[in-house]
Image (tube, grey):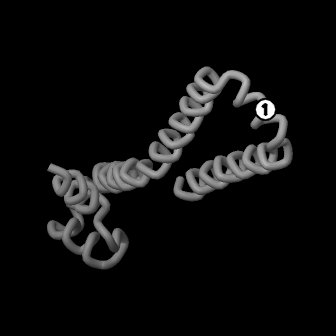
C-alpha cells in the first residue's frame, strides 16, 4: 500500500514538473495572456494552485490511513487465528506480539497518533 501511494505521489510531482516546464517554455505567450485579463486569469491560476496544494496535502496525510489499515489487518489476523491459538496456549496473544510477528503493534501506533492530536 505504501508503494502505491509513493507511485501516485511521484506521478503527481512529475505532472507538476511537466506543467512547470511547459509554462517556462511558453512564458511569453502565458505572460501576454495573463496581462490581458489579470483578474480572471489570476483567479483561475489561484484556484489551480490551491487544488494542487490540497491534493498534495491529502496524499501526504494518507500515512495515517496506512497505519489504520495495518491495525485492521492485525486485528483480523488475531480474530481469525484466535480460537485455535487460545485452545493451544492461553497466553498466545502476549507471545504473538512479543515474538516480533507484529514487531510494532499497529493498533498502538494508530491510537497513540490519533489521541496525540486531541
From the viewer's side, name the closer residue of 87 and 35.
35
Residue found 31% across the figure and 61% down from its top: 106
Q: In the image, is 59 to the left or to the right of 36?
A: left
From the viewer's side, name the closer residue of 13 and 95.
13
Q: In which quarter of the image is residue 44?
A: top right
From the viewer's side, name the closer residue of 12 and 45.
45
Expressed as whole percent of the image width and height from the top left, the position of residue 37 reads 68, 22
Badge 1 element: helix
Q: Does residue 80 appear anywhere in the picture? A: no
Q: Which residue lies furthest to the front in this view?
A: 35
Q: Does residue 67 appear anywhere in the picture? A: yes
From the viewer's side, name the closer residue of 84 and 4.
4
Residue found 19% across the figure and 71% down from its top: 94
Expressed as whole percent of the image width and height from the top left, the position of residue 111 reads 21, 54
Instruction: Establish if 21 lies above or below 105.
Output: above
Task: Please tell me how crowded label 1 is: few (under 14), some (14-19), or many (20+) other residues with Cα within 10 Å.
Answer: few
- For the image shown, how many numbered marks are present on the structure? 1
Q: In the image, is 14 to the left or to the right of 90?
A: right
Residue found 34% across the figure and 50% down from its top: 68
Q: In the image, is 20 to the left or to the right of 104?
A: right
Residue found 56% across the figure and 26% down from its top: 43
Expressed as whole percent of the image width and height from the top left, the position of residue 75 reads 30, 52
Q: In the image, is 65 to the left or to the right of 41?
A: left
Instruction: Establish if 4 lies above or below 103.
Output: above
Residue at label 1? Answer: 32
Amino acid at each position: 500500500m505504501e508503494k502505491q501511494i509513493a507511485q501516485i505521489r511521484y506521478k503527481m510531482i512529475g505532472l507538476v514538473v511537466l506543467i512547470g516546464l511547459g509554462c517556462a517554455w511558453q512564458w511569453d505567450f502565458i505572460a501576454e495572456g495573463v496581462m490581458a485579463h489579470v483578474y480572471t486569469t489570476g483567479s483561475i491560476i489561484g484556484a489551480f494552485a490551491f487544488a494542487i496544494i490540497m491534493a498534495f496535502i491529502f496524499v501526504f496525510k494518507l500515512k495515517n490511513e496506512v497505519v489504520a489499515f495495518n491495525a485492521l489487518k492485525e486485528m483480523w489476523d488475531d480474530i481469525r487465528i484466535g480460537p485455535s491459538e487460545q485452545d493451544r496456549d492461553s497466553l498466545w496473544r502476549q507471545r504473538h506480539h512479543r515474538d516480533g510477528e507484529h514487531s510494532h503493534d499497529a493498533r498502538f501506533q494508530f491510537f497513540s497518533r490519533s489521541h496525540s492530536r486531541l
